[in-house]
Image (cartoon, rainbow, N blue to C red):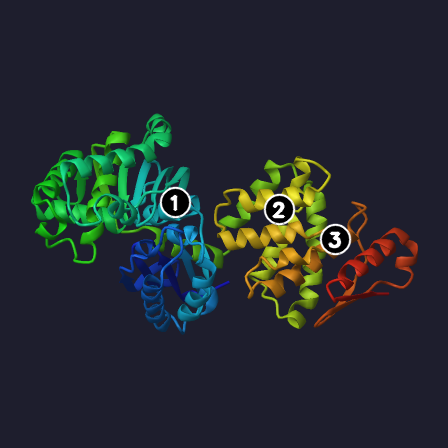
Amino acid sequence: MTTQNDTFAAVDLGSNSFHMIVANYVDGRLQVIDRLKDMVRLASGLDTRRNLNAESSERAIQCLERFGQRIREIPKGNVRAVGTNTLRQARNGRAFLAEARKALGHPIQIIAGREEARLIFLGVAHTIYHETEQRLVVDIGGGSTELIIGTGFHPAHLESLYMGCVSTSERFFADGEISAKRMRRALLFARQELEGVEATYRRVGWDAAIGASGTIIAISDSIAECGWGKGAITAEDLEKLRDRLVAAGNMSALALASISERRLPVFAGGVAILSAVFEALKIDRMAISDGALREGLLYDLIGRAHDRDVRNKTMSDLAERYGADPEQAKRVRAMAMDLFRQVRKSWNLDSRTDGTLLKWAAEVHEIGLSIAHAQYHRHAAYLLANSDLPGFSREEQFNLAMLVRLHRRRLALEELQQLADPDRPAIFQLCLLLRLAVLLNRSRSLAALPDITAVAGEAALDLAFPKGWLADHPLTQTDLESEREFLADAKFDLRYA
């Protein structure tokens, strides 16, 4: 648990801009104390092979060094940094993230598009709350556009489309020239991306449409500067803005003080996307929210610190959906966590991150049985790695899937090499604990297991059973012998008596 006055920070590595928000959480209320922003335009640094070039990477690292200096004194558990569409696509993303982690001083997680959408909705809901009103929230980023329908704090429909202001501007307005033909082509491109979702969204419907983040705020500001409206965007005003862009002929000739010099090159693409959204979803008016992804990150992070972690519900829902035996999961979880508590200090494991990951793995390790008993650990790992899991980053999903994948049979050490270097030792150790917890509960007996003492060494684990217990349970003793042989291949010594 946190104290009544804690400082939190959220960092959003977007495809267009990097944002950081720092806030105090005082007696149940969030007080923003600092905001930092840098228009890095990371998406423009992706080459044809989807590798980040050196120039954009260097801009990003320099920005993160500045951010890192600001949050140096904030506890690690109170900072969350996420990357979005461009880092989802980048083939050399792992190398970049290693440098970025050093620059920021904190891990950076890549989140899936629908998780990004969930967090955006959470940020908007906390900024403009209404308990019963059904909202459509639209967020146009540098590389993707998120569309969410939900009520209160609960999103019901989430979509992330691969179009953003940077990518669309570079495709249709790269030289800055704007013509009616180019604008129409950009609009049609965006309409194509929207084609798969527009019927569903229009059928579900909403009471109010809300736009979030820099692109839509910049469009709203430019409309207000032109004197057409204030505080909202109407379909009529958006059409007028489009006409003004075409009349200017080139972005450099667009005389609007509300559009910063750094946003100017990607503005036309944003206008085209928002126009397509208005057309496809038949929107007449869109209100504006100051809250978006980074605010959603903050509230999600605070929820985790105060035992309101959405990931717990995600795991319980997943176990229920795939019919995992709750009693067996409970037995395995209890044994895994008992072993964890005994070895945590020796192996330098973290109660909040490592312990929670082990708990979740125990709860869902059998979901693959819903597909087939043969290789069910592989089936479970596939489900965990490829499902949309609200609250989880891609890295967390992958680590969880790896734990479940390796919880039985041969210990596939070569697969552990796929993990990020900083995560590998802890995941290996957690894997051993899960394997032992499953092994000791293999009989699925209702009878309680005896007290088992665990003493951990750097590459060894000693288990002590009550005198005579193993002799009375020869099958368990045989299973432990097989496990010792599996672990010996990993140069790990399992001893028991």
Q: CA distance from mark 1 to mark 2?
A: 24 Å
Res 351 → quadrant? bottom right
What whole-number distance in Å separates the C-alpha atoms at marks 1 and 3?
38 Å
* Kind of element beneath mark 2: helix
Which of 406/228 is in front?
Answer: 406
Depth check, mark 1 against mark 2: the one in front is 2
Residue 41 rendering spot, x and y as whole percentages: 29, 57
Query: Distance between the Cα atoms at labels 3 and 2?
Result: 15 Å
Q: Which residue position is annotated with label 2? A: 381
Q: Nearer the viewer, residue 152 or 470?
A: 470
Q: Amino acid at mark 1?
A: Ala
> Where is the C terminus found, in terms of image quarters?
bottom right
Q: Mark 2 belongs to which amino acid?
A: Ala
Amino acid marked by disc 3: Arg
Secondary structure at badge 3 equals loop
| Residue where numbered disc 3 is placed | 410
Please tell me the numbered disc located at residue 349: none
Q: Looking at the image, is mark 3 or mark 2 nearer the viewer?
A: 3
Q: Which residue is mark 1?
A: 117
Q: Earlier in the sequence, mark 1 or mark 2?
A: 1
Up the image or down, 359 lies above or below 349; here it is above
> Neighbour class for label 1 at 10 Å: few (<14), some, many (≥20)?
many
Between residues 437 and 490, which one lies in front from this camera angle? Answer: 490
- Label 2 CA crowd tier, 10 Å (few <14, some 14–19, many 20+): many
Residue 475 x/y as whole percent: 88, 51
Residue at figure coordinates x 57%, y 63% from the top left: 423
**Residue 282 placement, left or right of 252:** right
Q: Position of residue 399 (x, y in %)?
A: 58, 55
Check contact, mark 1 vs mark 2: CB within 8 A: no
Left or right of 355: which side holds 140?
left
